[in-house]
Image (cartoon, rainbow, N blue to C red):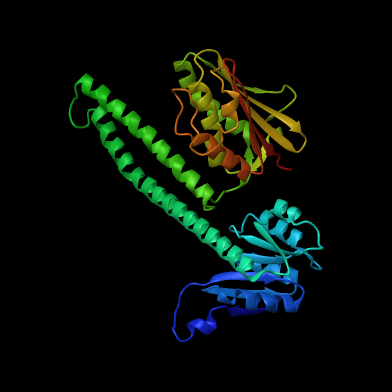
Amino acid sequence: MFTRRLTDVKKESQGTDSRCNRIVAVDDVADNLFLLQAVLHDINDCELTCFEDSREALLHVENDPPDLLLLDVMMPELDGYEFTQRIRKNKSLPYIPILLLTAHNELSPIAGLDYGADEFIRKPIAVDELNARVRALLRLKNSIDEQVMMAQQREDFVARLTHDLRTPLVAANRVLEMAVKDGFGKAPEALREMLKNVISNNSNLLAMANTLLEVYRHDAGQKEMAFARLNLHRLAKEVVAELAPLATERSLSLSLEVGATLSVSNFWIMGDGLEMRRVVTNLVGNGLKFTDEGEVKVRLFLPKDDQVAIAISDTGVGIPKAEQEEIFNRFRQGQHMRAGSGLGLHLSQRVIEAHGGCITIDSTVGQGSCFTMWLPRATL
Protein backbone atom coordinates (compact mmCIF):
# COMPACT_ATOMS: atom_id res chain seq x y z
CA MET A 1 0.00 0.00 0.00
CA PHE A 2 1.19 3.52 -0.72
CA THR A 3 -0.57 6.87 -0.46
CA ARG A 4 0.15 10.15 -2.14
CA ARG A 5 -1.73 13.41 -2.32
CA LEU A 6 -1.92 14.01 -6.06
CA THR A 7 -1.61 17.78 -5.70
CA ASP A 8 1.32 17.80 -3.26
CA VAL A 9 3.74 19.25 -5.77
CA LYS A 10 1.33 21.93 -6.94
CA LYS A 11 0.09 22.95 -3.51
CA GLU A 12 3.31 22.91 -1.48
CA SER A 13 4.16 26.48 -2.31
CA GLN A 14 0.56 27.64 -1.81
CA GLY A 15 0.14 26.08 1.64
CA THR A 16 -3.50 25.13 1.00
CA ASP A 17 -5.48 23.08 3.51
CA SER A 18 -8.36 22.25 1.17
CA ARG A 19 -10.17 18.96 1.77
CA CYS A 20 -8.99 16.04 -0.35
CA ASN A 21 -11.20 13.69 -2.28
CA ARG A 22 -9.81 10.32 -1.21
CA ILE A 23 -9.42 7.75 -3.98
CA VAL A 24 -8.50 4.10 -3.46
CA ALA A 25 -7.06 2.17 -6.42
CA VAL A 26 -6.74 -1.63 -6.34
CA ASP A 27 -4.67 -3.58 -8.89
CA ASP A 28 -2.38 -6.57 -8.39
CA VAL A 29 0.12 -5.14 -10.90
CA ALA A 30 2.25 -2.41 -9.33
CA ASP A 31 3.06 -0.81 -12.71
CA ASN A 32 -0.65 -0.23 -13.33
CA LEU A 33 -0.95 1.58 -10.00
CA PHE A 34 2.02 3.85 -10.77
CA LEU A 35 0.41 4.56 -14.14
CA LEU A 36 -2.85 5.56 -12.43
CA GLN A 37 -0.92 7.85 -10.14
CA ALA A 38 0.71 9.55 -13.11
CA VAL A 39 -2.55 9.80 -15.09
CA LEU A 40 -4.57 11.25 -12.20
CA HIS A 41 -1.88 13.75 -11.22
CA ASP A 42 -3.75 16.67 -12.80
CA ILE A 43 -6.91 16.19 -10.71
CA ASN A 44 -6.85 18.79 -7.95
CA ASP A 45 -7.34 18.12 -4.25
CA CYS A 46 -7.20 14.34 -4.40
CA GLU A 47 -5.35 11.76 -2.37
CA LEU A 48 -4.66 8.40 -4.03
CA THR A 49 -4.10 5.28 -1.92
CA CYS A 50 -2.99 2.20 -3.87
CA PHE A 51 -3.25 -1.49 -2.98
CA GLU A 52 -1.89 -4.57 -4.71
CA ASP A 53 -3.66 -6.89 -2.25
CA SER A 54 -7.44 -6.77 -2.79
CA ARG A 55 -8.28 -8.27 0.62
CA GLU A 56 -6.16 -5.67 2.38
CA ALA A 57 -7.85 -3.01 0.27
CA LEU A 58 -11.33 -4.26 1.22
CA LEU A 59 -10.47 -4.10 4.92
CA HIS A 60 -9.15 -0.54 4.47
CA VAL A 61 -12.29 0.57 2.60
CA GLU A 62 -14.60 -0.93 5.23
CA ASN A 63 -12.71 0.84 8.05
CA ASP A 64 -12.14 4.15 6.26
CA PRO A 65 -14.53 4.59 3.29
CA PRO A 66 -13.00 6.65 0.46
CA ASP A 67 -14.75 8.98 -1.96
CA LEU A 68 -14.02 6.83 -5.02
CA LEU A 69 -12.88 3.27 -5.79
CA LEU A 70 -10.86 2.30 -8.87
CA LEU A 71 -10.88 -1.49 -9.23
CA ASP A 72 -9.10 -3.76 -11.66
CA VAL A 73 -11.47 -6.51 -12.76
CA MET A 74 -9.07 -9.46 -12.93
CA MET A 75 -7.26 -9.88 -9.59
CA PRO A 76 -6.35 -12.87 -7.43
CA GLU A 77 -8.04 -13.31 -4.06
CA LEU A 78 -10.95 -10.90 -4.69
CA ASP A 79 -11.62 -9.84 -8.27
CA GLY A 80 -13.27 -6.53 -9.10
CA TYR A 81 -16.73 -8.10 -9.36
CA GLU A 82 -16.67 -9.72 -5.91
CA PHE A 83 -15.04 -6.61 -4.39
CA THR A 84 -17.89 -4.50 -5.79
CA GLN A 85 -20.51 -6.94 -4.58
CA ARG A 86 -19.15 -6.95 -1.03
CA ILE A 87 -19.06 -3.16 -0.90
CA ARG A 88 -22.67 -2.86 -2.09
CA LYS A 89 -23.90 -5.51 0.34
CA ASN A 90 -22.31 -3.73 3.31
CA LYS A 91 -25.16 -1.48 4.43
CA SER A 92 -23.01 0.21 7.07
CA LEU A 93 -20.93 1.91 4.34
CA PRO A 94 -21.91 5.21 2.75
CA TYR A 95 -22.32 5.38 -1.01
CA ILE A 96 -18.93 4.95 -2.72
CA PRO A 97 -18.70 5.39 -6.52
CA ILE A 98 -16.90 2.46 -8.16
CA LEU A 99 -15.02 2.62 -11.48
CA LEU A 100 -13.95 -0.72 -12.97
CA LEU A 101 -10.78 -0.99 -15.05
CA THR A 102 -10.89 -3.86 -17.54
CA ALA A 103 -8.74 -5.05 -20.42
CA HIS A 104 -10.29 -5.53 -23.86
CA ASN A 105 -9.78 -9.29 -23.75
CA GLU A 106 -11.32 -9.73 -20.28
CA LEU A 107 -14.88 -10.62 -19.33
CA SER A 108 -17.68 -8.17 -20.03
CA PRO A 109 -17.89 -5.36 -17.43
CA ILE A 110 -21.70 -5.65 -17.55
CA ALA A 111 -21.52 -8.15 -14.69
CA GLY A 112 -19.70 -5.54 -12.60
CA LEU A 113 -22.36 -2.96 -13.34
CA ASP A 114 -25.00 -5.48 -12.27
CA TYR A 115 -23.14 -5.95 -8.98
CA GLY A 116 -23.24 -2.20 -8.36
CA ALA A 117 -20.31 -0.56 -10.14
CA ASP A 118 -21.04 2.90 -11.54
CA GLU A 119 -18.69 3.11 -14.52
CA PHE A 120 -16.06 1.12 -16.38
CA ILE A 121 -13.16 1.98 -18.61
CA ARG A 122 -11.10 -0.30 -20.82
CA LYS A 123 -7.33 -0.68 -20.91
CA PRO A 124 -5.10 0.66 -22.30
CA ILE A 125 -6.38 3.68 -20.44
CA ALA A 126 -7.12 6.89 -22.33
CA VAL A 127 -5.88 9.69 -20.07
CA ASP A 128 -8.58 12.24 -20.89
CA GLU A 129 -11.37 9.66 -20.56
CA LEU A 130 -10.15 8.43 -17.17
CA ASN A 131 -9.77 11.96 -15.79
CA ALA A 132 -13.24 12.90 -17.03
CA ARG A 133 -14.89 9.82 -15.50
CA VAL A 134 -13.07 10.31 -12.19
CA ARG A 135 -14.10 13.96 -11.99
CA ALA A 136 -17.72 13.05 -12.85
CA LEU A 137 -17.89 10.35 -10.17
CA LEU A 138 -16.34 12.66 -7.57
CA ARG A 139 -18.95 15.31 -8.40
CA LEU A 140 -21.65 12.67 -7.96
CA LYS A 141 -20.19 11.57 -4.63
CA ASN A 142 -19.92 15.14 -3.32
CA SER A 143 -23.49 15.91 -4.42
CA ILE A 144 -24.88 12.81 -2.68
CA ASP A 145 -22.87 13.55 0.48
CA GLU A 146 -24.29 17.08 0.56
CA GLN A 147 -27.85 15.76 0.20
CA VAL A 148 -27.28 13.20 2.95
CA MET A 149 -25.89 15.91 5.24
CA MET A 150 -28.85 18.21 4.56
CA ALA A 151 -31.30 15.36 5.21
CA GLN A 152 -29.52 14.55 8.47
CA GLN A 153 -29.66 18.19 9.53
CA ARG A 154 -33.42 18.22 8.85
CA GLU A 155 -33.85 15.02 10.85
CA ASP A 156 -31.87 16.48 13.75
CA PHE A 157 -33.93 19.67 13.66
CA VAL A 158 -37.22 17.75 13.65
CA ALA A 159 -36.00 15.57 16.53
CA ARG A 160 -35.00 18.59 18.65
CA LEU A 161 -38.23 20.42 17.81
CA THR A 162 -40.30 17.34 18.64
CA HIS A 163 -38.50 16.85 21.92
CA ASP A 164 -39.00 20.48 22.89
CA LEU A 165 -42.71 20.37 22.01
CA ARG A 166 -43.52 17.71 24.56
CA THR A 167 -42.87 19.72 27.73
CA PRO A 168 -45.21 22.67 26.96
CA LEU A 169 -47.93 20.30 25.73
CA VAL A 170 -47.82 18.25 28.93
CA ALA A 171 -47.77 21.39 31.07
CA ALA A 172 -50.68 22.97 29.15
CA ASN A 173 -52.81 19.85 29.52
CA ARG A 174 -52.24 19.72 33.27
CA VAL A 175 -53.49 23.29 33.64
CA LEU A 176 -56.45 22.64 31.34
CA GLU A 177 -57.39 19.48 33.24
CA MET A 178 -57.36 21.45 36.50
CA ALA A 179 -59.67 24.02 34.90
CA VAL A 180 -62.06 21.27 33.74
CA LYS A 181 -62.15 19.95 37.31
CA ASP A 182 -63.01 23.46 38.59
CA GLY A 183 -59.55 23.94 40.09
CA PHE A 184 -59.76 27.67 39.36
CA GLY A 185 -63.44 28.09 40.16
CA LYS A 186 -66.55 26.60 38.63
CA ALA A 187 -66.44 26.86 34.85
CA PRO A 188 -69.55 27.08 32.63
CA GLU A 189 -70.46 23.80 30.95
CA ALA A 190 -69.82 25.20 27.47
CA LEU A 191 -66.29 26.29 28.50
CA ARG A 192 -65.65 22.92 30.12
CA GLU A 193 -66.52 21.13 26.84
CA MET A 194 -64.26 23.45 24.88
CA LEU A 195 -61.39 22.79 27.28
CA LYS A 196 -61.93 19.04 26.92
CA ASN A 197 -61.60 19.41 23.15
CA VAL A 198 -58.37 21.36 23.55
CA ILE A 199 -57.01 18.68 25.91
CA SER A 200 -57.92 15.98 23.38
CA ASN A 201 -56.24 17.85 20.53
CA ASN A 202 -53.14 18.47 22.64
CA SER A 203 -53.01 14.78 23.57
CA ASN A 204 -53.19 13.79 19.90
CA LEU A 205 -50.39 16.23 19.08
CA LEU A 206 -48.32 14.90 21.99
CA ALA A 207 -48.82 11.31 20.77
CA MET A 208 -47.74 12.34 17.27
CA ALA A 209 -44.64 14.10 18.65
CA ASN A 210 -43.71 11.04 20.71
CA THR A 211 -44.14 8.74 17.69
CA LEU A 212 -42.06 11.03 15.48
CA LEU A 213 -39.29 11.09 18.07
CA GLU A 214 -39.33 7.29 18.35
CA VAL A 215 -39.14 6.95 14.55
CA TYR A 216 -36.14 9.29 14.51
CA ARG A 217 -34.39 7.27 17.22
CA HIS A 218 -34.91 4.03 15.31
CA ASP A 219 -33.81 5.48 11.97
CA ALA A 220 -30.76 7.13 13.52
CA GLY A 221 -29.74 3.91 15.28
CA GLN A 222 -30.09 5.61 18.66
CA LYS A 223 -32.89 3.43 20.00
CA GLU A 224 -31.81 1.02 22.70
CA MET A 225 -34.06 -1.94 23.41
CA ALA A 226 -34.40 -3.46 26.89
CA PHE A 227 -34.84 -7.13 25.99
CA ALA A 228 -36.15 -9.58 28.58
CA ARG A 229 -38.43 -12.61 28.63
CA LEU A 230 -41.86 -11.33 27.70
CA ASN A 231 -45.15 -13.19 27.53
CA LEU A 232 -47.05 -12.05 24.45
CA HIS A 233 -50.31 -13.60 25.66
CA ARG A 234 -50.30 -11.56 28.87
CA LEU A 235 -49.35 -8.40 27.01
CA ALA A 236 -52.16 -8.86 24.47
CA LYS A 237 -54.66 -9.58 27.25
CA GLU A 238 -53.70 -6.34 29.04
CA VAL A 239 -53.99 -4.28 25.84
CA VAL A 240 -57.42 -5.76 25.05
CA ALA A 241 -58.63 -4.96 28.57
CA GLU A 242 -57.25 -1.43 28.30
CA LEU A 243 -58.98 -0.72 24.98
CA ALA A 244 -62.24 -2.51 25.81
CA PRO A 245 -63.99 0.74 26.91
CA LEU A 246 -63.15 2.31 23.52
CA ALA A 247 -64.62 -0.72 21.74
CA THR A 248 -67.76 -0.51 23.88
CA GLU A 249 -68.06 3.20 23.13
CA ARG A 250 -68.01 2.41 19.40
CA SER A 251 -70.39 -0.57 19.81
CA LEU A 252 -67.73 -2.99 18.60
CA SER A 253 -66.70 -6.42 19.81
CA LEU A 254 -63.07 -6.71 20.94
CA SER A 255 -61.80 -10.19 21.77
CA LEU A 256 -58.66 -12.22 22.39
CA GLU A 257 -58.52 -15.69 20.87
CA VAL A 258 -56.02 -18.46 21.62
CA GLY A 259 -56.07 -22.05 20.37
CA ALA A 260 -57.75 -24.48 22.77
CA THR A 261 -54.60 -26.60 23.09
CA LEU A 262 -52.34 -23.61 23.80
CA SER A 263 -51.62 -21.90 27.09
CA VAL A 264 -49.93 -18.75 28.39
CA SER A 265 -46.60 -20.61 28.59
CA ASN A 266 -46.57 -21.10 24.81
CA PHE A 267 -46.10 -17.43 24.00
CA TRP A 268 -42.78 -16.33 25.46
CA ILE A 269 -40.51 -14.09 23.41
CA MET A 270 -37.41 -12.03 24.08
CA GLY A 271 -38.62 -8.48 23.76
CA ASP A 272 -38.88 -4.94 25.03
CA GLY A 273 -42.18 -4.76 26.93
CA LEU A 274 -42.78 -1.05 26.35
CA GLU A 275 -42.07 -1.21 22.62
CA MET A 276 -44.15 -4.34 22.05
CA ARG A 277 -47.04 -2.85 24.01
CA ARG A 278 -46.79 0.26 21.82
CA VAL A 279 -47.06 -1.87 18.67
CA VAL A 280 -49.99 -4.03 19.82
CA THR A 281 -51.85 -0.98 21.17
CA ASN A 282 -51.30 0.87 17.89
CA LEU A 283 -52.57 -2.00 15.75
CA VAL A 284 -55.62 -2.74 17.92
CA GLY A 285 -56.34 0.99 18.13
CA ASN A 286 -56.17 1.26 14.34
CA GLY A 287 -58.59 -1.64 14.02
CA LEU A 288 -61.08 0.11 16.29
CA LYS A 289 -60.62 3.44 14.52
CA PHE A 290 -61.29 2.08 11.04
CA THR A 291 -64.16 -0.26 11.95
CA ASP A 292 -67.70 1.10 12.09
CA GLU A 293 -69.47 -2.15 12.88
CA GLY A 294 -68.51 -5.72 13.63
CA GLU A 295 -65.42 -6.75 15.57
CA VAL A 296 -61.70 -6.46 16.19
CA LYS A 297 -60.05 -9.76 17.07
CA VAL A 298 -56.59 -10.43 18.51
CA ARG A 299 -55.48 -14.01 17.78
CA LEU A 300 -52.38 -15.75 19.10
CA PHE A 301 -51.00 -18.89 17.44
CA LEU A 302 -47.81 -20.87 16.82
CA PRO A 303 -47.04 -21.15 13.08
CA LYS A 304 -43.83 -23.06 13.87
CA ASP A 305 -42.17 -24.54 16.94
CA ASP A 306 -39.68 -21.66 17.05
CA GLN A 307 -42.11 -18.89 16.12
CA VAL A 308 -44.93 -16.94 17.78
CA ALA A 309 -47.53 -14.99 15.84
CA ILE A 310 -50.15 -12.45 16.82
CA ALA A 311 -52.80 -11.45 14.29
CA ILE A 312 -55.02 -8.39 14.71
CA SER A 313 -58.00 -8.44 12.38
CA ASP A 314 -61.00 -6.17 11.93
CA THR A 315 -64.17 -5.92 9.87
CA GLY A 316 -63.45 -2.35 8.87
CA VAL A 317 -63.05 -0.41 5.64
CA GLY A 318 -60.04 -2.37 4.37
CA ILE A 319 -57.03 -1.08 2.48
CA PRO A 320 -56.69 -0.98 -1.33
CA LYS A 321 -54.01 -3.25 -2.82
CA ALA A 322 -52.01 -0.30 -4.16
CA GLU A 323 -51.80 1.24 -0.68
CA GLN A 324 -50.81 -2.04 0.97
CA GLU A 325 -47.48 -2.04 -0.88
CA GLU A 326 -46.46 1.25 0.77
CA ILE A 327 -48.42 1.08 4.02
CA PHE A 328 -45.30 0.74 6.19
CA ASN A 329 -43.38 3.61 4.58
CA ARG A 330 -42.66 6.75 6.59
CA PHE A 331 -45.41 9.38 6.39
CA ARG A 332 -47.44 7.12 4.10
CA GLN A 333 -50.98 8.14 4.94
CA GLY A 334 -53.97 6.15 3.81
CA GLN A 335 -56.69 7.75 1.71
CA HIS A 336 -59.31 7.27 4.41
CA MET A 337 -60.46 10.48 6.11
CA ARG A 338 -59.48 9.03 9.52
CA ALA A 339 -55.90 8.30 8.46
CA GLY A 340 -53.27 9.72 10.80
CA SER A 341 -49.71 10.93 10.31
CA GLY A 342 -48.48 7.79 8.56
CA LEU A 343 -45.89 7.10 11.27
CA GLY A 344 -47.55 4.48 13.47
CA LEU A 345 -47.25 1.54 11.08
CA HIS A 346 -43.72 2.52 10.07
CA LEU A 347 -42.69 2.58 13.72
CA SER A 348 -44.44 -0.74 14.35
CA GLN A 349 -42.48 -2.33 11.53
CA ARG A 350 -39.19 -0.94 12.87
CA VAL A 351 -39.91 -2.31 16.35
CA ILE A 352 -40.86 -5.77 15.07
CA GLU A 353 -37.77 -5.92 12.86
CA ALA A 354 -35.63 -4.94 15.85
CA HIS A 355 -37.08 -8.02 17.58
CA GLY A 356 -35.97 -10.23 14.70
CA GLY A 357 -39.48 -10.58 13.30
CA CYS A 358 -41.64 -9.19 10.54
CA ILE A 359 -45.14 -7.78 10.07
CA THR A 360 -47.49 -8.52 7.17
CA ILE A 361 -50.86 -7.27 6.01
CA ASP A 362 -53.82 -8.99 4.38
CA SER A 363 -56.71 -6.70 3.52
CA THR A 364 -59.77 -6.49 1.30
CA VAL A 365 -61.64 -3.25 0.69
CA GLY A 366 -65.02 -3.32 2.41
CA GLN A 367 -64.25 -6.52 4.35
CA GLY A 368 -61.45 -5.58 6.74
CA SER A 369 -57.75 -5.94 7.42
CA CYS A 370 -55.46 -8.31 9.27
CA PHE A 371 -51.99 -7.34 10.48
CA THR A 372 -49.86 -10.29 11.59
CA MET A 373 -46.62 -10.08 13.55
CA TRP A 374 -44.25 -13.04 13.30
CA LEU A 375 -41.67 -13.22 16.11
CA PRO A 376 -38.97 -15.66 17.28
CA ARG A 377 -40.17 -17.80 20.15
CA ALA A 378 -38.03 -17.68 23.30
CA THR A 379 -36.42 -20.94 24.31
CA LEU A 380 -37.05 -22.24 27.81
Query: At 81% across and 68% down in the image, what residue appears?
Result: 76
Above or below, 127 relative to 269 = below
- The answer to whether one can see residue 181 in this image is no
Q: Nearer the viewer, residue 232 or 86?
A: 86
- The answer to whether one can see residue 321 in this image is yes
Q: Is residue 196 left or right of residue 93?
A: left
Q: Is residue 225 left or right of residue 380?
A: left
The image quadrant that residue 167 belongs to is top left
How many numbered discs? 0
Q: Nearer the viewer, residue 106 or 239?
A: 106
The image quadrant that residue 131 belongs to is bottom right
Q: Nearer the viewer, residue 263 or 87?
A: 87
Q: Position of residue 75 (x, y in %)?
A: 79, 68
The residue at the far bottom in this view is 13
Above or below, 178 relative to 154 = above
Q: Position of residue 323 (x, y in %)?
A: 56, 28
Q: Is residue 375 left or right of residue 205?
A: right
Query: At 48% across and 82% down in the image, what residue appears?
Result: 11
Query: At 61% across and 22% down in the image, what residue appears?
Result: 363
Above or below, 283 relative to 87 = above
Q: Position of residue 57 (x, y in %)?
A: 70, 70
Q: Position of residue 177 (x, y in %)?
A: 29, 32
Above or below, 19 relative to 270 = below
The N terminus - image quarter: bottom right
The C terminus - image quarter: top right
Query: At 53% across and 18% down in the image, what residue appears?
Result: 317
Q: Nearer the viewer, residue 123 or 324?
A: 123
